[in-house]
Image: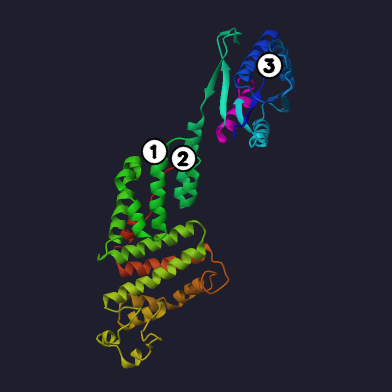
């Protein structure tokens, strides 16, 4: 359904405030009204604007048989107060928006009034016009008026793009994609940003295959050359993460998980962050035991015997209902200690601290408790896990760097 037009018009007094200037200004505003033929007109101004409107009404009567009675005057108490001007125009726009197609005319008025009109048009995607023409002594001459449309969408889009980058930096990938839909132009930019968000959203969700499918290091680097080094590192990491058998894959998974925990902490989601640290510590033990040929999901007792473990210690391993021996985090490190492995020795040395930190996770509402965790809990646990990671592989910081997400400079 085609909507009727409503015009929001700022009204001044004309240059110098002379009768000639007032009549000229009124004639210009009337020219715009006649061009767009609105069903409703809202004037914004002060008491000093009323003579301009009166002049407009008289000139309208000379040209039309009907009276100019389809207008409303909104008085601005402080015409140089941006908040007052902006709020009144915004509120009126929102009041009319559902029922009318709105056009904003900012031909006249104080600088604050016209600036407010421009901002309202930009934020709410409304057509913005002014009347121009040949001037003599600053006054537009009758008969020379013409409508000039102003496009502020570019400014709006640039502001939105800045917000989109902020969304990326704070890992709000789905929200960022939603924000992209509000951008009017810049279609090429929207498309590549969508690819970027899809890639890193999947990366963040530990869906490395989908992240790899959406990741285009060359295209991303051409668009954002300042982030080329970061994209190349991430591309290398994703390639390894998607290689079925790669001798470094498990370390990149660990590094990605540690970065995932850090991102959750940056978002103040400490329960989530600590849950990921717990899984990281567990994964470190599993990776190390695999080097001994031990699968923690199905421990082979014969393999343990090959490592000269005592019969008494071996009796502590019990089969489950599926006749499999499965061991968890604590048992992983106890076993590593029995194997005289450096990680096991580290665990036992820090045993009391680690048990305290494990309580953070176990007492978390995301695990077995009802407590919320805080930044200190996260930092304490993180330091232990990072140290264990470095014992596992001296190059872990390199892998962490290669799985770290880039950030835009804002």
Q: Position of residue 129 (x, y in %)?
A: 57, 23
Q: Residue furthest top?
A: 136
Majority secondary structure of the magenta segment? helix
Label 1 SS: helix
* 40 or 352, nearer to the observer: 40
Q: Image check: 49 left or right of 302?
A: right
Query: Crowding near pointer 2: few (<14 within 10 Å), some, many (20+)?
Result: many
Q: Position of residue 358 (x, y in %)?
A: 47, 74
For residue 314: magenta?
no
In the image, the segment drawn in magenta is 105-125
Q: Earlier in the sequence, mark 1 or mark 3?
A: 3
Q: Is residue 4 visible?
A: yes
Which quadrant, please, contains the N terminus? Answer: top right
Q: Position of residue 70 (x, y in %)?
A: 72, 24
Instruction: Determine whether 120 is above or below 410 in the image.
Output: above
Residue at the spot of label 1: 188
**Res. 306 image quadrant:** bottom left
Instruction: Determine whether 271 is above or below 174 in the image.
Output: below
Residue at the spot of label 2: 161
For the point 67% across and 19% down, the residue is 12
């Amino acid at each position: 359904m085609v909507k009727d037009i409503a015009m929001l018009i700022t009204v001044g007094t004309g240059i110098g405030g002379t009768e000639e200037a007032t009549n000229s200004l009124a004639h210009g505003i009337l020219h715009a009204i006649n061009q767009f033929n609105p069903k409703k007109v809202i004037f914004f101004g002060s008491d000093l604007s009323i003579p301009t409107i009166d002049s407009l009404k008289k000139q309208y009567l000379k040209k039309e048989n009907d009276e100019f009675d389809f207008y409303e005057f909104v008085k601005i108490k402080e015409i140089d107060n941006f908040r007052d001007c902006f709020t009144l125009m915004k509120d009126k726009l929102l009041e009319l928006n559902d029922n009318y197609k709105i056009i904003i005319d900012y031909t006249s008025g104080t600088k604050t009034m016209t600036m407010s009109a421009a901002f309202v048009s930009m934020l709410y995607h409304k057509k913005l016009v002014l009347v121009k023409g040949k001037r003599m002594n600053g006054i537009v001459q009758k008969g020379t008026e013409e409508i000039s449309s102003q496009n502020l969408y570019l400014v709006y889009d640039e502001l939105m793009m800045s917000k989109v980058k902020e969304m990326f930096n704070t890992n709000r990938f789905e929200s960022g994609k939603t924000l992209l839909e509000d951008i009017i132009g810049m279609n090429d930019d929207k498309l590549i940003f969508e690819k970027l968000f899809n890639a890193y959203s999947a990366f963040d969700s530990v869906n490395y295959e989908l992240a790899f499918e959406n990741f285009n290091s060359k295209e991303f680097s051409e668009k954002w050359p300042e982030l080329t080094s970061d994209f190349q590192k991430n591309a290398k990491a994703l390639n390894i993460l998607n290689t079925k058998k790669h001798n470094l894959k498990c370390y990149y998974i660990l590094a990605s998980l540690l970065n995932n925990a850090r991102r959750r902490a940056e978002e103040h989601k400490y329960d989530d962050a600590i849950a990921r640290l717990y899984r990281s510590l567990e994964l470190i033990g599993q990776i190390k035991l695999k080097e001994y040929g031990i699968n923690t999901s199905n421990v082979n007792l014969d393999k343990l015997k090959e490592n000269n473990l005592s019969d008494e210690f071996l009796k502590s391993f019990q089969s489950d209902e599926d006749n499999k021996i499965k061991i968890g985090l604590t048992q992983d490190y106890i076993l590593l200690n029995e194997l005289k492995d450096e990680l096991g020795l580290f665990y036992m040395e820090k045993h009391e601290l680690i048990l305290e930190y494990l309580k953070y996770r176990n007492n978390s509402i995301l695990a077995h408790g009802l407590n919320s965790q805080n930044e200190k809990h996260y930092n304490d646990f993180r330091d232990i896990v990072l140290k264990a990671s470095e014992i596992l592989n001296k190059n872990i910081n390199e892998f962490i760097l290669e799985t770290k997400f880039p950030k835009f400079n804002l």
